[in-house]
Image (cartoon, grey):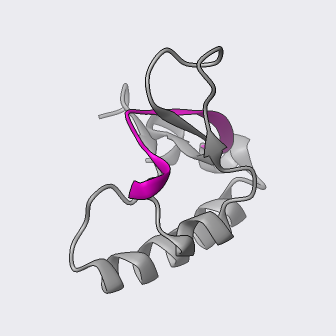
């Protein structure tokens, strides 16, 4: 759908080992595409992933996502993580 956006985040995907490899490779590709956002529709955006705890994120993601950290109570009312992730504008990307 051109009105939807796509956010990169490997959310509870199995098998875990394969999902991690896929996630890291796709992150590399999206970061490359984000260098040309007007052309590709991919932007690197910082925000809070709500209802996501540090325990749900493996070391593989923590090491690859600089700035990944828990949101403070003053930043977000629930449990969440700050992250800088690829966000895809589907109308441009498709």
The relative height of residue 65 versus residue 75 in the rendered view (above or below) is below
Magenta-drawn segment: 42-56
In magenta stretch: residue 44? yes
**Most common SS among magenta residues:** strand
The image position of residue 57, as x and y in percent, is: 46, 60
Q: Residue furthest left?
A: 14
52 left or right of 84 in image:
left
The relative height of residue 33 versus residue 45 in the rendered view (above or below) is below
Q: Residue at horizontal 26%, vertical 59%?
A: 12
Q: Residue at horizontal 60%, vertical 61%?
A: 30
The N terminus lies in which quarter of the figure? top left
Query: Camera-side residue: 49 or 92?
Result: 49
Q: Residue at horizontal 41%, vertical 41%?
A: 52
The picture quadrant where one finds residue 72 is top right
The image position of residue 73, as x and y in percent, is: 59, 19
The picture quadrant where one finds residue 70 is top right
């Amino acid at each position: 759908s051109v009105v939807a956006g796509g956010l990169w985040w490997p959310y509870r995907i199995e098998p875990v080992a394969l999902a991690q490899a896929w996630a890291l490779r796709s992150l590399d590709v999206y970061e490359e595409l984000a260098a040309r956002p007007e052309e590709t529709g991919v932007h690197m955006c910082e925000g809070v992933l709500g209802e996501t705890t540090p325990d749900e994120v493996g070391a593989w993601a923590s090491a690859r996502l600089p700035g990944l950290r828990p949101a403070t109570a003053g930043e977000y009312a629930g449990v969440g993580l700050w992250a800088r992730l690829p966000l895809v504008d589907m109308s441009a990307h498709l």
